[in-house]
Structures are given as structure tokens and as C-alpha cells.
Amino acid sequence: VQLAILLFEGITPLDAVGPYEALRCLPGIETVFVGHRVGPVRSEGGRLGLVVDAPLADVPRPDVVLVPGGPGQVALMTDEPLHAWLRQVDETSAWTASVCTGSLVLAAAGLLAGRRATSYWLALDQLGGLGAVPTAERVVVDGKYVTAAGVSAGIDMALTLVALLAGDTAAQRVQLAIEYDPRPPFDAGSPRTAPPEIVEALRARSRFILTGTR
Amino acid sequence: VQLAILLFEGITPLDAVGPYEALRCLPGIETVFVGHRVGPVRSEGGRLGLVVDAPLADVPRPDVVLVPGGPGQVALMTDEPLHAWLRQVDETSAWTASVCTGSLVLAAAGLLAGRRATSYWLALDQLGGLGAVPTAERVVVDGKYVTAAGVSAGIDMALTLVALLAGDTAAQRVQLAIEYDPRPPFDAGSPRTAPPEIVEALRARSRFILTGTR
């Protein structure tokens, strides 16, 4: 099983690393970090460098494709060579997946038309505008398209994907291997549970959060 | 507030990236990824390259120090220059933190003697052998030492740390920003809840899991 994870300038690294950490535990999986150019890209805010190991053209038939999100996703919305690669690999992939605003990129490439999908909570309206059926759930599976809500949801998505690829026992084993027994100190991780004033504060800054620009 | 996150060969990237993603949202924080040499290190299994931006000597007084874990932690147990840096920065740090087997390194450097601390569930016995008081909790705070259980526990730890640094509202805001509303598809993330045969299977492979060697 070959897993291709897209890296790009302005990525939210947890969107890529959360799923990677769960999926890499799967026996027989080979992960390749792909992007336009081999070498480091910088995360949102420029702080963390993550290394692209293969150009897109070198990975034409991954079994699983994962598109993370992050403020840098904005530039990917009109990245035609990337869209062409996504459409190409989607023809043969077993699973095409995204985390956070990565689903906007899949939708922009035309892959989520009429499909139920999710995204970062602040991006669900935009997802609907791109032809998908926005669905405010943690993980949405529609056919071979597996989309996750924001950032940390990639871990839940990856465990779902491990179960789909290798069965429930394999997924439980991975869950214990990464000791995923979450104990958030607060119940503020969703707009449904967070204090309303915090939801409104982030909504007011949503343009900055989604694009990294003021 | 300066946050120094240690990177090293054989790191488990989620140990570093989970906390980074939560802590980077804190207003006024400056994160620097440190290590012995500037440039990429490779994660466990060699798959993901993460870039060290500053040598240890260039970061003598971080406010928060974070030591992730991973199979490469084994080499750090006898890394005297690293231990010397950890002891030095610990003299002035506000918080000294670890994720997963990173607590073994803090303990090996002599920083957890007599302290309550946690680690990866398969490493708690070893932590006790290094002079700490092993505590099977998700996040343990003892004085200025904040340790997390395995891998994904770094996210819970970082939210705890944000609350300690900037208050509960700041932590709730970060939690919503990373949409941390976990919905694991199984209840297998702890040896107390996972099916016993899975716990035993991982325990039998613990030497491989902890060290990356057979």
C-alpha cells in the first residue's frame, strides 16, 4: 500500500503528521511525502520545515492520497498542475482523503461534486460553494472519499481509514500504539461546545485563520 | 515567550507537532526547532524529514523546553552534550516538558529525580528506574515539569500548558482553533481499555516499538 501525503508552503503540519503517525503503523504501508519540488517547505507562520521527498510526477499511482490543509491551501485553489495530478491519482486510488481545508482543494480539483464531505468548521460554507455537500461531522466517508474536520480530526480520520484498509483490530492496535486516549482539559473543541464568545472571536478572525493574511 | 522544541534522528513526529500546533497559537510565542545540527532529521522509520533551525548552543534560555520521544530517544539516553544543555536551560525555564519517551531523556539528564512524571505506557517501568515517580496519567504536572503519556497525549499536554501560561480562555480558544473535539472510532487508546490481546501483542513487541530495533 503506497500512501502519498501532500506537503506545501503554509501547511498546517498536524494535518499531515497526525494521519501519518496512525497510518505508518499499518503493516506493509509505504509513505511518500510529495510536493511540487523536493526539499523543505515551511508550515503556517514559517516555523517548521517539512521535507518533500518526491515530486508529484514521480508518484503517479498511490493507493491512498492525503491532502492536508493550512493557510497555504489558498494558493492551491488555483494550482492547475496540482489539480491535474489529483485528478490523475484519483483515477486509480483506493482512497482519496483530506484533513481540514484540504477538502477545499479536492473540491476545487472537481473531485467532491455532489459528495458529502467535511472541512475545518470555518470553511464548511466555502466547501458547499465548491459543489460538495458540507457535512458537519468529525469524519465523513462517501464512496472512496474520506474527509476530516479541522486539524486534529486527521487522527480520527486516519484510524477510520486504517479500519477500512485493514480491519478494526488493526485500527485498535494502531490506536494503542499511539496511545490515543484523548483527555482534552476543556470541552471547547467544536463550535457546538466552545463558549459562544470564543466561537465568535474566531469567526471574526476567520479570514486570517483560513488564509494567514490580514 | 520562547518555546524550544527538540528534534532528533528517529523522533516520533506527532510528539513534536501535536504540542507545536497548540502552543504556536499562543499570542506572543516564538517557536524554535533545535537540535545538534541545523538541517533535516528523519523520523522513526526514516520517512519524514523535519528541519532543525538552530543548534542547541544558540538557544540558551528558552521559556519553555519540549523534549519529544520516539525510537531515536535511545541514543539520547547517553548524549552528554544534550543532557548538559537540558540541565542548563532547565535552570531558567518556566516550564520543562516532554511527550512520550521524551521523559526518559529528561530523567536521564537528572531533571526528574523524585518527581511525579509520565511517559509512553510501555516505558513507565523504565521511567521509574531512572529516579522519577512513574504516574500512569495522561498529563502530569509536578512543579514546572509537565510530562505527557504516549504520542497523541502531547496535544492534551500542550493545552494544559497553554492554560498554565495564558489562562483557561486562551486554552479553550486554541482548542477550538485546532478543532480538538476528539472522536476516536474505538476505545483502544489505553492499556486499560484496549482488548487484552492487543495490549499483550504490543507488550511483546515493546522492545522494537521503544527502540526501533529487533
Image (cartoon, coloured by chain):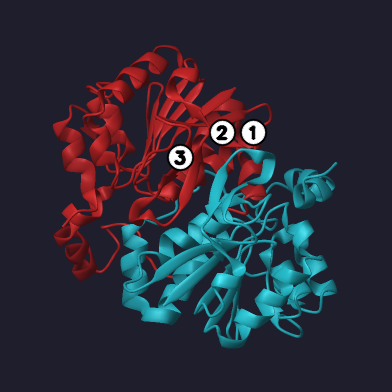
Chain colours: A cyan, B red
The part of the image, by quadrant, that contains residue B214 is: bottom left
Circle 3 SS class? helix
Could you say whether the residue bearing mark 1 is in a helix, strand or loop? Answer: loop
Q: Residues within 10 Å of mark 3 (few under 14, many from 20)?
A: many
Give the x, y percent position of residue A20.
47, 61
**Chain for mark 2?**
B
Q: Residue at x 61, y 46 (%)?
A: B175
- Among numbered discs 2 and 3, the one appearing first in the sequence: 3
Quadrant of the rendered image containing residue B179:
bottom right
Q: Which residue is mark 3?
A: B157
State the residue in front, A39 or B59: A39
The total of numbered circles placed on residues is 3
Q: Height in image: B69 above or below A17?
A: above
* Res B117 seen here: no
Image mark for residue B26: 1
Pointers 1 and 2 in contact (C-beta within 8 Å): yes
- Could you tell me how far apart the alpha carbons at marks 1 and 2 are, in whole angstroms? 7 Å
Is residue A144 shown above or below B18? below
Task: Give the camera-side residue of A109 and A39.
Answer: A39
Badge 2 vs badge 3, beta-carbon distance below 8 Å: no
The residue at 54%/49% (across/down) is A50
Q: Nearer the viewer, residue A138 or A174?
A: A174
In front here: A89 or A133? A89
Q: Is B36 on the left-hand or right-hand side of B202?
A: right
The verdict on a common chain for dots 2 and 3 is yes
Disc 2: which residue: B162
Which amino acid, mark 1? Answer: Leu
Asked if badges 1 and 2 are on one and the same chain, I answer yes
What residue type is disc 3 on?
A: Met
Counting residues from the N terminus, which is met first, the one under dot 3 or under dot 1? Answer: 1
* Quadrant, the N terminus of chain B: top right
Does residue A137 appear in the picture of this structure? yes
